[in-house]
Structure formats: C-alpha cells, structure tokens
C-alpha cells in the first residue's frame, strides 16, 4: 500500500510526497499523512501570491477566477475537502500532525480558511479551539503500547515538539477519542477518532530545527497504516525468493494456473456478455422510449440486415448500402409519431443541401405507441408525417417492420431478400411496408435462433 504525505516529507519507497496543490487525487490512497501547519501556511502563501503553486497537472493556481488556463485556489480547496471526505467514506486512515487552530480570510470565493477546513469530524465534534488547544512540549508518554502509531512516534521521539493538545472536556471527546500519547502533564497529544468509515489519527509534530532526521518514519507509517487496515505489511526482500520452503513452489504454480484459468474465464464472460448485449439491443427497437436509445437499437437492427452504419462530418447518423446513403432520425413516442420527426430530419437534410448542393435520402425510424405491446398498437404514425414523407420524398420505417427484418436476417434470410429489404428502405417515399418480404414477428414468438446456423 502506498501512503500520500502532504507537507510532511518522509523517506520511503512506499511514500508519495506532495503538497496540497500538486498531490494526486487524495481518495485514491488508503493512507494520507497531512502536516496541518504546513498545509495552512502554504494556503496562506498561495492566497497572498507568495510563490508559484502548481497542480499535479502543472496548472498554475491563482487566488481568483480560473482564467487563462489557471486553476482557482478556492475550487482546489473545495475539491481537496471533498476528496478527504470521500477517502474517509472509503475507510481510509488520515494521519494529521496537529497544530493550534487558526483562521485566514484571504481566499477569494472561499469563506474562511481554518487549519482543519478539509477534515471531517465525528458527529457532534469540531476541530476548533474548544477541542484543540495550542501548546508546546518536547516530550510525550505512551499510554497505549498496542496502538500501531506508537512505532511511528518512536522514530522521532527525540525530535518532538508538539504544538497542540486536546481538551478532554470538549463535546464528543470522551465518546470517540482513543488516546495513545499524552504529555508528561497528562494532556492528550496522540489521539485516534473514528470518522465516517475511516479514522483520523492526530500525532504530535516534529521540531522543524531537528538535525537528526527521522529516517525510519516513512516505513513505520506505512507499516502502521497497513496494520490498521488489516494488510500484511512490509516489502519482501530480494533474497527471500532464494530460501526454499517445502511445497511452496507447487502451491505457487497452482496459484498461477488458477489465475490463468480465472483470466480465461473472465475473457470468455466478457465476450459472451458483449455478444448478448449486442443481440439484446435489437429487441430494444420495440420498446425504446427515448430517441437516443431507439437510434442505438435501430442501428443494431440495420447492421443485422446488411447496412453499414456511419456518420456525417457533422455527426448525423447515416445508413450505407453500396452507393446508397440514407440520413436517419429515430423518433419514439407514447402516442403516434408526428411532425417533430419530420422537422428534425429536414434540419439534417437541409444542412447537407446547403453545404454540398445535393438532396440526400432521408429515413425516419418511428416507434409509436412504444409503451404498448406491439400486437396492441393501432396508430403508430400520424397521417401528417406520412403525407410529409410522401410529399418531400423520404421514408418512414415503423420499428416493428425493422424488427421483423432483423429477425429474418438472424434466421438466415437469403441475401436476395435482405438486399430487397435494404433497397425498399432506401427508395420508398412514405411509409415502408416489408410484409411481402419478411414475416411479421411479435414479441414472445420463437425468434428462430438455433433453427439455423448463425455466424454472429
């Protein structure tokens, strides 16, 4: 497990050191270390324009509106607050090197930055001056030797300079707090709190002037976080592979075989799921109640009967059959499909006329009375749309007819039959009738899958 450390530089192969500004997304980590004082100072410096601050994507951070490719400081702070909350909701451990609460009002668009603005608290508690009090001390005493973060404290015990302690009389403290470090005078300086689905652990700070760097702090932090999360800690050393354990090689080989079988099964499942979804989309042409979902199902049916599906440079869908090109509009309605489909198609066609000086063929795929069973539908297309299609020379294809043609294709209809279906769709002025070419197919009837070979 990797640990994200913000404004608290630690060595270690498991540690990613960053600032609040250039850190990756926080909730991608299961353990986050934050120097509260360092973060507060850096936010104040960014608000005052004291230095250059960049995001992880090297975007400059400005205290104001996000202009000229810059990121807003207020938006970034809000995002970091949301990310810490989401990390805790996922069960993360957030370690905070504590300092006295403070406030700063210089961030444009962000009401009052305080020291712990990004950190949620347990119900009924707040990380304010009533809970955290400023103070200085160079010693602490372990009162819970079983707590995993005691080993972290031991790496910098000689360089300790805590800057805050907790008020045990603060609301909620007695209910939530788990104290593992106290000052010699008894004040809590190392405390764990359950927050959301995770935990927040406050640690006493190190001295900024210490000469003896806590070289083992990073490894100890990673190991302590692993222990809290129930993860086996430590990185296997290179020489461990050379030490033989009877039966281990055979078991590792069994693991590899099982993983290979799992991967093959997953690939087979993915392929089967994709194939089933593609076939199921054909059925959607009968019940889709939205134009976008109907268009997707209609294109799947069109491909089944031999059309190629493409798009114009403007992104409008077209059906291709040899040299023939038909512009498509899908229209679904709980009532009969009316003139709105005509106007949508005319907009596409008129754009082509204006830009290319020729009149393309058009097609409206109409799924009228889409909420009713296909067998119960009485009037799927308004007369006005039929007359408009006949007058301006484009085709209106009922969804039921398109579905019947797709089923015929899946039942291995002859190439000649499918070619005739495509030709009629491309060449009809008005409502397309396909009953003489394909048998109407209602839901619940045998689709014929399996009655003849289906290479798809």
Image (spheres, rainbow, N blue to C red):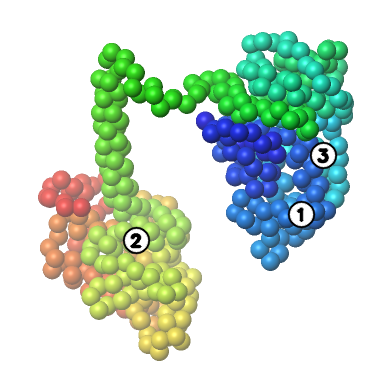
Q: Is residue 323 left or right of residue 342?
A: left
Residue highlighted by disc 3 = 114
Tell me where residue 391 sits by quadrant: bottom left
Q: Which residue is drawn at the image coordinates 30% and 23% (left, top)? A: 252
| Callout in the foreground (2, 1) | 1
Q: Secondary structure at mark 1?
A: loop
Residue highlighted by disc 1 = 51
Q: Secondary structure at mark 2?
A: helix
Q: Which residue is drawn at the image coordinates 49% and 21% (left, top)? A: 232
Picture coordinates of residue 347, whole percent (x, y): 47, 77
Name of the residue lying farthest toward the bottom: 357
Picture coordinates of residue 384, whole percent (x, y): 43, 74
447 relative to 68, above or below: above
Asked whether 77 or 312 is in front, the reply is 77
CA gap, disc 2 and disc 3 = 56 Å
Residue highlighted by disc 2 = 298
Q: Alpha-carbon neighbours of circle 2 within 10 Å: few (<14), some, or many (≥20)? A: many
215 relative to 74, above or below: above
Picture coordinates of residue 205, whole percent (x, y): 76, 28
């Amino acid at each position: 497990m990797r640990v994200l450390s913000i404004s608290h530089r630690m060595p270690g192969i498991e540690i990613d050191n960053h600032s609040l500004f250039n850190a990756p997304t926080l909730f991608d980590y299961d353990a986050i270390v934050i120097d509260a004082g360092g973060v507060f100072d850096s936010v104040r410096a960014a608000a005052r324009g004291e230095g250059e601050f960049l995001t992880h994507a090297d975007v400059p951070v400005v205290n104001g509106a996000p202009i000229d490719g810059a990121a807003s400081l207020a938006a970034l702070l809000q995002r970091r607050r949301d990310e810490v909350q989401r990390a805790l909701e996922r069960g993360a451990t957030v370690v905070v090197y504590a300092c006295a609460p403070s406030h700063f009002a210089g961030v444009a668009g962000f009401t009052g930055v305080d020291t712990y603005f990004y950190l949620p608290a347990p119900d009924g508690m707040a990380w304010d001056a009533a809970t955290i009090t400023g103070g200085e001390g160079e010693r602490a005493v372990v009162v819970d030797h079983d707590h995993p973060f005691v080993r972290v404290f031991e790496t910098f015990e000689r360089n300790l300079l805590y800057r805050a302690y907790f008020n045990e009389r603060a609301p909620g403290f007695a209910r939530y707090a788990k104290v593992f470090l106290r000052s010699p005078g008894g004040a809590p300086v190392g405390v764990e709190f359950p927050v959301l689905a995770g935990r927040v652990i406050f640690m006493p700070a190190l001295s900024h002037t210490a000469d003896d760097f806590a070289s083992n702090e990073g490894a100890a932090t990673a190991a302590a976080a692993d222990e809290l999360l129930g993860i086996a800690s430590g990185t296997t050393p290179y020489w461990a592979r050379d030490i033989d354990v009877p039966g281990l090689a055979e078991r590792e080989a069994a693991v590899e075989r099982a993983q290979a079988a799992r991967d093959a099964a997953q690939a087979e499942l993915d392929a089967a799921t994709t194939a089933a979804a593609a076939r199921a989309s054909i059925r959607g042409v009968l019940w889709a109640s939205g134009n976008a979902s109907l268009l997707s199902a209609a294109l799947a049916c069109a491909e089944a009967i031999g059309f190629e599906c493409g798009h114009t440079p403007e992104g409008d869908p077209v059906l291709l059959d040899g040299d023939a090109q038909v512009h498509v509009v899908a229209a679904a309605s709980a009532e009969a499909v009316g003139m709105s489909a005509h106007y949508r198609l005319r907009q596409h066609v008129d754009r082509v006329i204006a830009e290319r000086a020729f009149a393309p063929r058009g097609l409206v795929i109409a799924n009228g009375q889409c909420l009713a069973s296909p067998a119960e539908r009485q009037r799927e297309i308004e007369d006005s749309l039929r007359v408009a299609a006949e007058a301006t020379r484009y085709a209106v294809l009922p969804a039921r007819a398109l579905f019947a043609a797709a089923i015929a294709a899946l039942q291995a209809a002859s190439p000649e039959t499918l070619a005739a279906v495509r030709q009629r769709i491309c060449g009809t002025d008005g409502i397309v009738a396909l009953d003489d070419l394909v048998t109407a197919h209602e839901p619940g009837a045998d689709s014929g899958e399996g009655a003849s070979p289906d290479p798809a």
